[in-house]
Amino acid sequence: MVEITPKEKAAALSVFGDRTALAERYVQHLATSGMERGLLGPREVPRLWSRHVLNCAVVAELIPSDAYVADVGSGAGLPGLTFALARPDLRLTLIEPLERRVTWLNEVIDDLGLDNVEVLRSRAELAVGQVKADVVTARAVSALNKLAPLTIPLLEGHGQVLAIKGRSATEEIEKAAKVIRKLGGTDTSVVTVGEDLLEEPTTVVRIVVGR
């Protein structure tokens, strides 16, 4: 079992509500088969809740109701599966090119009984035309100047990209500004979420495309 502190449990209940037990099951998958299959390292297990699952899940508050979300480079389902758990109203496609990760994601989705999420084995640039999302999300995929061309085209001219980033967010925006504008980005900002729930809030770069 992965231990959860009282503060993390309170945050989980706030974010996942009556699906907190499912979120706990997801964390157990991460700590066991996820680690065994190399989706994350053993050093991450003690901080799965704070650094990974809750860090991602709080971003769900930025996603409009009933949106169709594409999560690029889903890997271990971070952030995509946390959104599927926290927001049953959303419809999600997890885009992941590596077969072993796709297999693991499908196993976890089946075990958790989630009916609002599917997995597409594809590189992001090849998913354009197959996926037309309202919101595209990504975490730990690449620097923003390389991430923008992988995410913005999936919106087909309208919507927003939510990229979970670290302290270099502002610097990355400056370096990517020209690329973002060329791809149709009309407004780029840094948003902080989870201040009231997490010891270290989550930094998100939000790119608005179209109006």
Image (cartoon, rainbow, N blue to C red):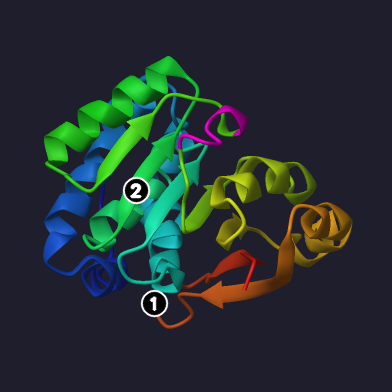
Which residue is the site of mark 1? 197
Label annotation for residue 92:
2
| Residue 192 sits above or below residue 171 on the image | below
* Side (left or right) of 109 relative to 171: left
Q: Tell me where the magenta segment starts and ends, as one range.
A: 125-130
Q: What kind of element bears circle 2?
A: strand
Query: Do labels 1 and 2 touch, CB within 8 Å?
Result: no
| Residues packed near mark 1 inside 10 Å, few (<14), some (14 to 19) or many (20 plus) | some
- Magenta includes 126? yes
Q: Quadrant of residue 117?
A: top left
* Residue 102, percent from left and from top: 37, 24
* Residue 178, percent from left and from top: 88, 57
Residue at 82% across / 54% down in the picture?
Answer: 182
Q: Main secondary structure of the magenta part?
A: loop
Query: Earlier along the polypeptide chain: callout 1 or callout 2?
Result: 2
- Magenta includes 196? no
Residue at 75% across / 41% down in the picture?
Answer: 146
